[in-house]
Amino acid sequence: MAAGTQVLCMGNAIVDIIARVDDQFLEKHERIKGSMMLVDAKTSAAIYADMPPAMERSGGSAGNTAAGIASLGGKAGYIGKVHNDQLGTVFTHDIRAVGVSFETAPSLEGAPTATSMILVTPDAQRTMNTFLGACIELTPDDVTADVVADAEVLYVEGYLWDSPTMKAAVLKAFDLSHEAGRKVSLSLSDSFCVGRFREEFLDLVHSQVDILFANEDEIKALYEVDDFETAVAQVQKVGKLAAITRGEQGSVVVTKDAAISVAAGPATVQDTTGAGDLYAAGFLYGYTNGHSLKECAVLGGMAAAEVISHLGARPEVSLKDLKSSLHGL
Amino acid sequence: MAAGTQVLCMGNAIVDIIARVDDQFLEKHERIKGSMMLVDAKTSAAIYADMPPAMERSGGSAGNTAAGIASLGGKAGYIGKVHNDQLGTVFTHDIRAVGVSFETAPSLEGAPTATSMILVTPDAQRTMNTFLGACIELTPDDVTADVVADAEVLYVEGYLWDSPTMKAAVLKAFDLSHEAGRKVSLSLSDSFCVGRFREEFLDLVHSQVDILFANEDEIKALYEVDDFETAVAQVQKVGKLAAITRGEQGSVVVTKDAAISVAAGPATVQDTTGAGDLYAAGFLYGYTNGHSLKECAVLGGMAAAEVISHLGARPEVSLKDLKSSLHGL
């Protein structure tokens, strides 16, 4: 059966609260630059109380990827849990407005819609402090066979391992996807996230995952190695398709037989939030539209370059228009 | 008694929902470009459902002015009503984070925190669609003698005339301010707002108001004249201090004896939202710091130029730093 959806993305539905801070702010609040740290309500309130005026924009790793695919003109769906509140309305509006199909029922009880306080330092690095809120209300019941089977590729963020019910929802989706003859794709999300779930992620990469997304730190953390080449060699041994981003050094697409390096898209970096998410968007758009692996990586680099050139983790211009300016794509 | 606060601002406490749209969007939804239109919940929902992905930032005319004064290093206070909800938390955080004193109790019942959908067209004009929500819960009880008496200048937005209880709160504040020997300042807000309350505004300008803020359209609407010079002559006859903005033509400060023209600050205009609010911020900061009227207008122009150079109605950089780059100020 032909798929109606190209990519079904699944992740934590989050509204970002974004502000520029200096390095001292990170030190004061004991944040690890570049990481995503989970915060409880109390820590969240303490950081927010000290945070400069901010802007709010929809985010969430897989949500950003879905928005990117839609912006490229692709058909994307999203599964994630918001609460029935103002920020849930914001998240729902923004992802639907760009053309993503999002039908997960909001929670009516329990915690509010998730927020992530994103601290952008002068070096354009982002440090994320996420209060998961309603995200943890995602359960296997939110994953249905028809929606998963309808999607050519299922794309899941590793962050979903942070709660047992979210993870159970993912594993159900993996099974449904494979039963329908579709591909399963995983993003390792964050090197600390890899640290928390390394054994499980390794097992998945060696078994159920068809397409792996990671950045250099994450893939090194997965294989507990210090150098990139050794990590790539490990991935190659597994024989899966992997797309590994390296910041301004671009990305490497790894298959059993090849490692294809592609340069990064040109960008004046303002805020690295969403770089990996949008790389995955470009790559998967290319993948599900019959582009070569090299072209997939070029599209990923293009989408990532757009999103890091401004504050906020979703495209500000039509990626479809941007793509049409790329020769031959 | 010396004032502890330089400027106490009073207005509708609003979170802006900002997106770029084309002119066709305004036509489809029958919006009048450049205006602020009040919308009910139903119209608000209809526009939002059709609106592109957006960003949320704290706004509200007088709130923007208070934030601007604080960003300049001045002591500002704010009176306005949010609901005890997520967007109310956002508004409260943002205005306090920049250093404004904001102690109005949030409403616990009734409508949610106000939002304004701000549609920015390619010509950088903003068209605002405001759902007043909790703002209309502002009452005279929210205005206390000690807070008003503590402020050298009371600054009020004309938009507060849109509900009888808000207006009653303003009139109480006017009386308290004058009783304490302070100055009262009014912004005409919007030419359609002037249309709605022209007689009352005229009466106030001729009686209670000490400092009047308006743009060219608003002052022409107030005096129902077609040309700017005639309007200025009318203001001059009243003998009050008035600061009238003219977009890229800068501003004119009008007193009984003089009309001082000052050029606009240099800017690449992205979004005109907040231009008048930040002009008032710069002007009143200068006024309460003993600057000449010409210098007040220069500071107003500087603050306005910063805010129109990006999306969002509050400063993105320290206006104090910006001011220190102005020779002699």
Image (cartoon, coloured by chain):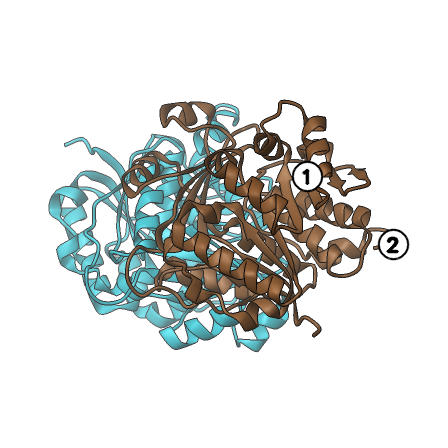
Chain colours: A cyan, B brown
Disc 2 residue type (three-letter): Gly
Residue B75 in picture, x, y percent from top left: 65, 66
Q: Chain of mark 2?
A: B
Q: Quadrant of the C terminus of chain B?
A: bottom right
To which quarter of the image does residue B262 belong? Answer: top right
| SS for callout 2 | loop
Residue B151 in picture, x, y percent from top left: 63, 66
Q: Chain of mark 1?
A: B
Question: Badge 1: few (under 14), some or many (20 or more) residues near its Cα, within 10 Å?
Answer: many
Q: Which residue is disc 2 drawn over? A: B328
**Residue at mark 1 to residue at mark 2: CA–CA distance:** 23 Å
Mark yes or no: residue A237 visible: no
- Taking depth in this image into account, of B287 and A207 the one nearest to the observer is B287
Residue A276 in picture, x, y percent from top left: 45, 50
Image depth: mark 1 or mark 2 in front: 1
Disc 1 residue type (three-letter): Ile
Judge whether B8 appears above or below A311 on screen: below
Q: Is residue A246 left or right of residue A96?
A: right
Which residue sits at x=46%, y=24%? B23
Do tag 1 and tag 2 residues touch (Cβ < 8 Å)? no
Q: Which residue is disc 1 drawn over? A: B244
